[in-house]
Every structure is written in structure tokens, then in C-alpha cells.
Amino acid sequence: MDFCTANWYPLGDVYYRKFDLYQMEWNIKEEFKDCLVAVGPYGGPIALMKNYLTKERASSSRPVLEIYSASGVLLSTLTVSMFS
């Protein structure tokens, strides 16, 4: 018989548990280790851009900024031109 507190974890004087609310919808082309990532607070959007400064790049290519919802749905794709 499992204890009902088996999946609770201590955090200071209180306990917490975590569980999946939903499956992420995204199909990311790059790995996170190769990207610059920024996340909005309180479940806001997630911005991903391939780390343009450290990777080898073609001179004609421009970085692409992808904006995802908190559940991983692609909201927008932008080509960034400030890195010419």
C-alpha cells in the first residue's frame, strides 16, 4: 500500500508535490543547450533563439526567434535582423 505522502518533498518548513498538468505541444528543432531561452513570469510565453553568437553560422543566415505559449504551442516566429 502506497502512502498518500510518498510523492511530497520538503522545502524548508513546508512540503510540496509536483504533477504534470498537460503534455508540452512543441516540436523543438534545436536542443535547449544550443539556445538562448527567456521565460515570462507566471506561466507566460517562452522565447527560444539558437545561440547565434557561439555557433558556426552562414554569413547569409539570420537568427530566428520562436515564441511559444506556456504549453508549448508555437505562437510566432520572427527573423532577427540586428545581428547582421
Image (tube, rainbow, N blue to C red):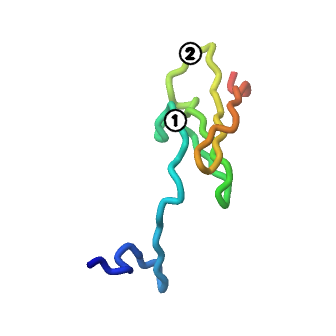
Which residue bears the numbered disc 2?
58
Q: Residues within 10 Å of mark 2 (few under 14, many from 20)?
A: few
Between 5 and 48, the residue placed more toward the observer is 5
Which residue bears the numbered disc 1?
28
| Amino acid type shown at disc 2 | Ala
> Which residue is located at x 64 percent, y 35 percent?
66
| SS category of the residue bearing label 2 | loop
Q: Are marks 1 and 2 in contact (CB under 8 Å)?
A: no
Q: With respect to residue 44, does 74 lie above or below?
A: above
> How many numbered discs sit on the rendered protein?
2
Please state the horizontal and vertical placement of residue 9, each as a whole percent of the image: 41, 75
| Extreme residue in the right direction | 82
Q: With respect to residue 69, does 80 lie above or below?
A: above
Residue 82 lies in what quarter of the image?
top right
N-terminal label among 1 and 2: 1
| SS category of the residue bearing label 1 | loop
| Extreme residue in the left direction | 1
> Which residue is located at x 64 percent, y 42 percent?
68
Q: Residues within 10 Å of mark 1 (few under 14, many from 20)?
A: few
| Amino acid type shown at disc 1 | Ile
Q: With respect to residue 65, does 68 lie above or below?
A: below
Q: Report how far apart the C-alphas of labels 1 and 2 lie in the structure.
A: 21 Å
